Image (cartoon, rainbow, N blue to C red):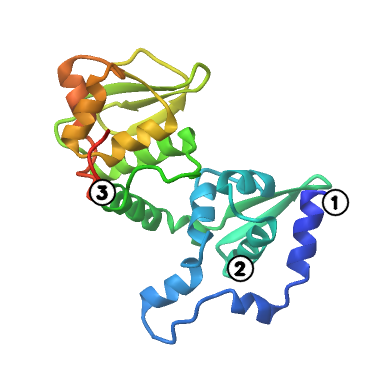
């Protein structure tokens, strides 16, 4: 049975009352409580995160979310559809694409605020078995920098190499931050791995300077310092880098 049929069968088998039981009910009137009843369940906001990048197929979401089960993803998508946050479109005979509705797109600022808070206050070293996707990490950095607006940043270009065939360029043109796959002429070049990069982000400023000083980056001292201080104080870090 293919993914589309499997997903449809699970969704069709769920009665409306079963869908309602998927949600946590706080029995407390507050706009924040109502919002959490809608998008506060496990995986819901991460599905929104992935769909903020554009339409995705069931298999795309399953692969990106890594540890979610097919049944769990189907249930979450069905609940988000019922709330008018996600819609699905059938392309051809067997392909289904999920996309955010305008109501879902309105969650972008909510997600960005949560991401910024998480980067500044909840980030820590990678946990055992934790999946780290370099592309998604780069997207998170761009969103973070766009909202935090680090002071004193000039036009700059950073290249991050995650192995021989996976590089990303992050650029600030004086007005906005962007990222693209591949390399460009850069002010800073960082050769790293996904877990080492997370260790850099979760360290304090001095820890980041030590990390960059171990020949993991190329660039002038001033440009490297801009990279070091572009992120928050990493209050969630569990200690200095080894």
Q: Residue furthest front?
A: 242
The residue that appears at 24% across and 45% down in the rendered structure is: 234
The answer to whether marks 3 and 2 mark residues whose Cβ atoms lie closer than 8 Å is no
The answer to whether marks 1 and 3 mark residues whose Cβ atoms lie closer than 8 Å is no
Q: Secondary structure at mark 1?
A: loop
Tell me, yes or no, if residue 28 can be seen here.
yes
Can you tell which quarter of the image residue 180 is in? top left
Measure the C-alpha gap from mark 2 to mark 1. Answer: 23 Å
- Which residue is more in the foreground, 110 or 210? 210
- Measured as percent of width and height from the top left, residue 45 is found at 48, 58
The residue that appears at 70% across and 53% down in the rendered structure is: 89
Pointer 3 residue: 120
- Measured as percent of width and height from the top left, residue 47 is found at 54, 54
Q: Secondary structure at mark 2?
A: helix
Please give left or right for residue 72 compared with residue 116 in the image.
right
Pointer 2 residue: 79
Judge the density around disc 3: few (<14), some (14-19), many (≥20) Cα neighbours within 10 Å. Answer: many
Q: Secondary structure at mark 3?
A: helix
- Measured as percent of width and height from the top left, residue 233 is found at 19, 44
Measure the C-alpha gap from mark 1 to mark 3. Answer: 44 Å
Query: As displayed, is residue 201 above or below residue 188?
Result: below
The residue that appears at 15% across and 20% down in the rendered structure is: 222
Pointer 1 residue: 1
Tell me, yes or no, if residue 188 can be seen here.
no
Circle nearer the N terminus (2, 1): 1
Circle nearer the N terminus (1, 3): 1
The residue that appears at 22% across and 20% down in the rendered structure is: 213
Please give left or right for residue 169 compared with residue 57 in the image.
left
Please give left or right for residue 26 compared with residue 220 in the image.
right
Can you tell which quarter of the image residue 179 is in? top left
Q: Which mark is residue 185?
A: none
């Amino acid at each position: 049975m293919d993914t589309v049929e499997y997903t449809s069968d699970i969704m069709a088998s769920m009665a409306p009352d079963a869908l309602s039981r998927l949600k946590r009910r706080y029995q407390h009137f507050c706009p924040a409580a109502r919002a959490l009843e809608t998008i506060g369940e496990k995986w819901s906001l991460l599905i929104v995160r992935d769909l903020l990048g554009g339409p995705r197929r069931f298999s795309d979401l399953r692969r990106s979310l890594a540890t979610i089960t097919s049944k769990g993803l189907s249930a979450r998508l069905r609940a988000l559809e019922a709330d008018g946050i996600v819609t699905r479109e059938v392309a051809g005979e067997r392909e289904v694409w999920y996309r955010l509705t305008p109501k879902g797109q309105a969650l972008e600022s909510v997600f960005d605020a949560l991401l910024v808070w998480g980067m500044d206050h909840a980030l820590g070293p990678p946990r055992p078995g934790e999946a780290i996707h370099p592309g998604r990490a780069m997207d998170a950095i761009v969103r973070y920098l766009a909202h935090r607006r680090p002071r004193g940043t000039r036009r700059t270009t950073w290249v991050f190499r995650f192995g021989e065939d996976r590089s990303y360029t992050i650029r600030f043109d004086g007005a906005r931050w962007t990222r693209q796959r591949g390399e460009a002429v850069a002010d800073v070049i960082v050769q790293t791995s996904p877990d080492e990069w997370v260790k850099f982000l979760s360290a304090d400023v001095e820890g980041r300077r030590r990390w960059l000083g171990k020949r993991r980056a190329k660039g002038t001292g001033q440009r490297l310092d801009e990279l070091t201080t572009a992120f928050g104080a990493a209050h969630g870090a569990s200690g200095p880098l080894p």
